[in-house]
Image (tube, rainbow, N blue to C red):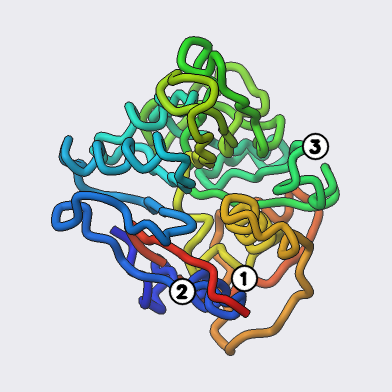
Amino acid sequence: ERELNSESAQGLKAFKEELESSSYDLEELNLVEKSQVPEDAALVCVLGPKQAYLESEIRVLENYLSKGGELLLALDPGEKHNLSGLARKVGVDFKNNYVILLDPTRGQASATSIGTQFDSKNPITASLPENKTLTLFDMASELEIDPVTSKGLDVSVLVSTAPSSFIMKELKTEVTDTGTQKSFPVFIYSTGSFGGEKENDPSFKAVVVGDSDFLTNRFFLVGSNRDLTMNTVAQLTEQKDLISIRPREQKGDKLYLTGPVHLGMVMAGVSLPVVLLLLSGVLWYRRRGA
């Protein structure tokens, strides 16, 4: 699991500090010890799990959603997290592959993909102008709206990658065939009655992401990742007054630009700072009273 207080590139401290500055209380939730999610939880986050969830843990999350809970589920491909079934129950098919970005001008491919296409109707992404901003994901999986389990739910793709993307089932150092190049969904919003229950049952809200790296210290302050993340939290916790494009702030003095990140920025035609900071596993948030 990703560590909430870690300042490493793979940690979540930048995300944590941003949440705390917006008056959210954060606590880690042990689903083995807890038989249910706390009643005052405004949002449960499952961020980059590395180990398989037990069936008992999954049932706790399912019960929470059936009561109208809110979930941010960020899954990485290649991990045996055992949560693809949970994603499918909210109408999302986690493909467990890798979205690769192709730079035809340089003949290079990168596992750091760029989100360039945004849903203009959903409040989470409406403030992110298409083709004028970008979000970065690292080794992200393609997502699809499941045609069967999405019936009766309101499911929409919020972010898709650049059209010069292609799919690899396994990561390889050499690419001989890129196959079809197109945009792939990596960020999906879903709401409705969990498990196709009665119409008058409470509606859950969930966001499923095919990557958790976009939340880490390495990527959180790159491009519009922070805006996308905080808008997601605000929408799921019904703090819609917090949905916006936030002013850029210079934090700390640790800056580095990796090869894949540089490739993504060059392809998007922008130059943005990469700030080193990071986050973790299962969290629940509640909004503090002002």
Residue found 41% across the figure and 53% down from its top: 44
CA distance for labels 1 and 2: 27 Å
In this view of the protein, which residue sits in the foreground, 125 or 288? 288
In this view of the protein, which residue sits in the foreground, 91 or 179? 91
Which label is found at residue 172? Answer: none
Earlier sequence position, callout 1 versus callout 2: 2
Left or right placement of residue 215 versus residue 173 in this view: right
Which label is found at residue 25? Answer: 2
Q: Is residue 184 visible?
A: yes
Residue 114, quarter of the rendered image:
top right
Give the foreground label among 2 and 3: 2
Q: State whether residue 52 is above or below residue 199.
A: below
Q: Label 1 amino acid?
A: Val
Residue found 62% across the figure and 36% down from its top: 102
Q: Label 3 amino acid?
A: Lys
Q: In x, y percent, where is residue 219? A: 55, 63
User: Circle 1: is it few (<14), some (14-19), or many (20+) Cα within 10 Å?
Assistant: many
Mark 2 lies on a secondary structure that is strand
CA distance for labels 1 and 3: 29 Å
Earlier sequence position, callout 1 versus callout 3: 3
**Which residue corresponds to mark 1?**
274
Q: In x, y percent, where is residue 269? A: 81, 53
**Which residue corresponds to mark 3?**
121
Q: State whether residue 107 is above or below residue 220.
A: above
Left or right placement of residue 248 versus residue 71 in this view: right
- Which quarter of the rendering shows the C terminus? bottom right
